[in-house]
Image (tube, grey):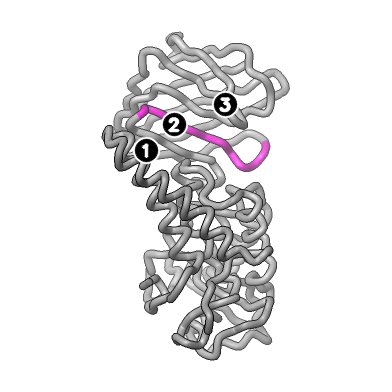
Amino acid sequence: QHNTYDIEFYGPNPLCGIYYLAGLRATEELARVMGDDELAARCHTAFERGSARLDALLWNGEYYEQRLDDVDAHPYQHGAGCLADQLLGQLHARALQLGDLVPPEHERAALGAIYRHNFRRDFREHVNCQRSYVLNDEAGLVLCTWPRGGRPRFPFVYSDEVWTGFEYQVAAHLIYAGQAAAGLDLVAAVQARHDGVRRNPWNEVECGHHYARSMASWAVLLALSGFGCDVSAGCLAFAPALPGPFRSFFGNGTGWGSYSQHETTVGLRCELRVDDGVIQLGELRLRLTQAAESVVATHNGIAVPSTVVPAPEGVIVRFEPQQELHGGDVLAVHIR
């Protein structure tokens, strides 16, 4: 199974396996949108079987590991190692609202293990025979560690390195999992290394200058804002991960702008400002910590028909008919 480490993994492993599960769920949803119920059902069945099998086979009680009869039969494997991107497929599923690919309690535990075992605050005693993207008193997230032993004789060649793209990936996933402080800890480590004195803050080098993997930083914005969209259903979602008043950029492929909200003891006020493009909005999914009894919505100051219904961890505000928002438009919602 070829992968981003420029080598092949053999046998059941979490990186490729969970990524495959994400692909099955995405294909299932796309098939439903296109009306191909047969394909959707096939993908759903394969996902259900694959998810159960992967969890039973690869979960070691703390994180997901690669299963091989002999980890040294092939070079460049990780075996019992704690791989930083073992949950990459689940991160995609979180960002795309595809649900749980693995049991959520195992997801949270594995994220905790990655943060605990792979994040180092000092690299003075760290042995790395490959490229050094972190030095001495700097902090960073190592690609793979072996807290339970079992390091292969020839582990995959980049295992002792630190890559910003993986740090952002794990940071975003920690935020999605409700561990925002740990996630922002990883982001702070990247920023401290690229402070304009030690390294260029506009060039987070991996295998070359301006390496594309650092664009995983965008996932941190998605996680902090809890942004989600389903253009086919005219749906936008926001679930800020931090308490207090919130404001953030958003974009859904047809338009972009800013979203802001402020929740108090008497309800939630939010505002959607479109700067450019066109957005068809049929429903707005919002995180709310209190019961909702009524909603008032306005489009450029004019009241529009809307209803509010409860949803897991929040509410859904529905607009009938759909609202068409253009550049310069403002949609305001007050939920009590």
Please state the horizontal and vertical placement of residue 257, each as a whole percent of the image: 41, 35
Q: Nearer the viewer, residue 49 or 258?
A: 49
Q: Nearer the viewer, residue 34 or 292?
A: 34
Task: Give neighbour class at mark 1: few <14, some 14-19, many 20+ (Cα, 10 Å).
Answer: some
Residue 106 among magenta residues: no
From the image, tell me which residue sits under label 3. Answer: 311
Can the viewer see residue 191 in this picture? no
Residue 242 among magenta residues: yes
Q: Earlier in the sequence, mark 2 or mark 3?
A: 2
Q: Earlier in the sequence, mark 1 or mark 2?
A: 2
From the image, tell me which residue sits under label 1. Answer: 252
In screen coordinates, is 208 left or right of 12? left
Q: CA distance from mark 2 to mark 3?
A: 14 Å
From the image, tell me which residue sits under label 2. Answer: 236
Up the image or down, 150 lies above or below 269; here it is: below
Task: Give neighbour class at mark 2: few <14, some 14-19, many 20+ (Cα, 10 Å).
Answer: many
Identify the secondary structure beneath mark 3: strand
Residue type at numbered disc 3 = Ala
